[in-house]
Image: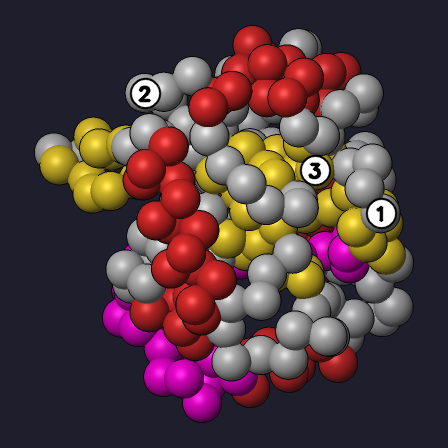
Amino acid sequence: MDIPRVKLGTQGLQVSKLGFGCAGLSGVFEGPVPDEVVISLFKEAFSKGITFSDTSDFYGPHTNEVSVGKLPRDEVQLATKFGVVKVESNNAIVRGDPEYVRSCCEVACAVLVWNILISIHTSVPIEETGKVKYIGLSEASPDTIRRAHAVHPITALQMEWSLWSREIEDELLPLCRHTVQPRFQGQNFDKNKTFYFRIEKLAEKHGCTTAQLLLHASSSRGRCGFHPW
């Protein structure tokens, strides 16, 4: 299977249309994966044409960036993000002040030769933060996207978008088609079992897996997608 390449943003960055989400490699969902397994997974993904990966300083924390930072930078495009300091009682504690942003950039540069910074800013005006070539946003509002893009071109937007979660299609998606290209993902499986079984039957009809059908549905409507999260 050849994974096509697409352009993100307006600054010339090209990535694989399907990406690899790294959260599960550092114990975000289950136990952490050994470095040698991480490298083998990326080699397998790369052999299939998947060269775009997403990480964060929160994954580990930091250990995920260290692991994926060992990959050859001339062969992959790596997005990282920051902003979530910790999670307390299911609530994220977020920082976005300029001093913190600069410190995160320094740490990331120490372990990565990176192509995109996907960052989260909530407590400080977006106009005051960041200094990288490619800038992205994660879970940003339409107003934040507009303000950020007015200061520096936004290359990528990381949002939840799937057949189960389509809220961004009303306002965010039209906005992104003129500014940045969103990242797709799916969730809420347990709350949508009836819908899932319909998708499962449709996949059987077309001789593919449900994952393949969902990825095709997303990728046919936008730029690039990540699987898993």
Q: Quadrant of the N terminus?
A: bottom right
Q: Residue at x 58, y 67 (%)?
A: 113
Which is more N-terminal, label 3 or label 1?
A: 1
Name the residue beneath numbered marker 1. 12
Q: Residue at x 22, y 33 (%)?
A: 93
Number of numbered labels in the structure image: 3
Q: Residue 24's spot in the image, x, y percent? A: 40, 62
Q: Magenta span has 161?
A: no
Q: Residue at x 62, y 50 (%)?
A: 116
Q: Which mark is residue 155?
A: 3
Q: Residue 192's spot in the image, x, y percent? A: 48, 32
Amino acid type at image mark 1: Gly
- Packing grade of label 1 (10 A; few <14, some 14-19, many >=20) is few
Q: Magenta span has 27?
A: yes
Q: Residue at x 37, y 32 (%)?
A: 98
Q: CA distance from mark 3 to mark 2?
A: 22 Å
Amino acid type at image mark 2: Ser
- Packing grade of label 2 (10 A; few <14, some 14-19, many >=20) is few
Query: Between 28 and 68, which is closer to the camera in this rendering?
Result: 68
SS for callout 1: loop
SS for callout 2: loop
Q: Which residues are magenta?
A: 15-39
Which is more N-terminal, label 2 or label 1?
A: 1
